[in-house]
Image (cartoon, rainbow, N blue to C red):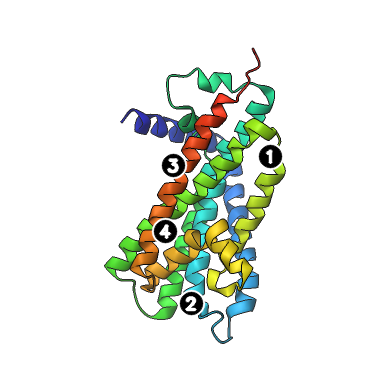
Amino acid sequence: MRYLSLLGLQLRKSVTLAMQYRWDFMVSGALALLWTVTGLVPFHVAFHDRPPVGGWTYESALVVVGFFTLLRGVLDGAVNPSLLSVVQQIREGTLDFVLLKPADAQFLVSTTKFEVFRMFDALAGLSLVTFAFVRLGRAPTAGGVFTALAMLAAATVVLYSIWILVIAAAFWVVRVDNLAYLFDSLFDFARWPVSVFKGVWKFVFTFVIPLGVMTTYPAEALLGALATQTAVASICGATLLAVVARIVWIRAIGHYTSASS
């Protein structure tokens, strides 16, 4: 309950800061929606009025794009703003101010800042999923919705854990900016269903950088096409990755040299 209270406090702080500059909030939200629409152009060209690509029709693949847009909002709205600032704190040796506080350091650095306008991405993602099912002429089943929510939670855990591993690397190599930008660029491939990729790229985007877990599997769950064993394996894999990220973070903290040392 204490950490939920702290999370609520950080959210209220971010909302207050966003509301102080309302026009900036609205313009940033409009730009986020513009980028979402722009990102639909290559998808529309690849799937519209064409035979299924990798077993995906235009409507079913649009569900994947919806989950991608939703997770992009999570990444840019909740993960990036807080964790990218940690790299600067490590570099300057000012992480002391976080470590000295009477709360878990990983929780604090993960909830420092939220970009509230990124909620427009989440709304756009939900709208795309809704539009896709309208085009399909059916609604998802209750079981599909439940499984999709579970897979979305697993996807969020995977996304967050990968970023914790990237940020933890800064304790050893100091500059991880290029690595962060690389992952951010690779994440754009998550807008495509993982079965579209063949050979080594399908292996990489399924097991090495699990983009399939992030967007394709939640979409398949909502469409009622995800195998139970795949869902269970994905949830177990996300849990294992979270544990590994936590262990690496704790070891990384041990290598931190403060500005006062």
* Pointer 3 residue: 243
Q: Which mark sits nearer the N-terminus, 2 or 4?
A: 2
Q: What's the amino acid at mark 3?
A: Val
Which of the two discs, 1 and 2, sits closer to the camera?
1
- The answer to whether the residue labelled 4 contacts the one labelled 1, judged by CB atoms less than 8 Å apart, is no
Residue at x 54%, y 48% (from the top left corner): 75
Badge 1 amino acid:
Val
Q: Quadrant of the N terminus?
A: top left
- Please provide percent x and percent y for residue 140: 34, 71
Label 1, label 3: how far apart the Cα atoms are: 22 Å
Vertical placement of residue 14 versus 254, above or below:
below
Viewer-nearest residue: 55 or 232: 232
Marks 1,2: beta carbons within 8 A:
no
Label 1 – label 2 distance at C-alpha: 38 Å
The kind of residue on which mark 2 rests is: Glu
For label 2, the crowd category at 10 Å Cα-Cα, with few meaning under 14, some 14 to 19 and many 20 or more, is many
Residue 257, above or below 123: above
**Separation of disc 2 and disc 3 at Cα?**
36 Å
The residue carrying mark 1 is 176
Image quadrant assignment for residue 89: top right
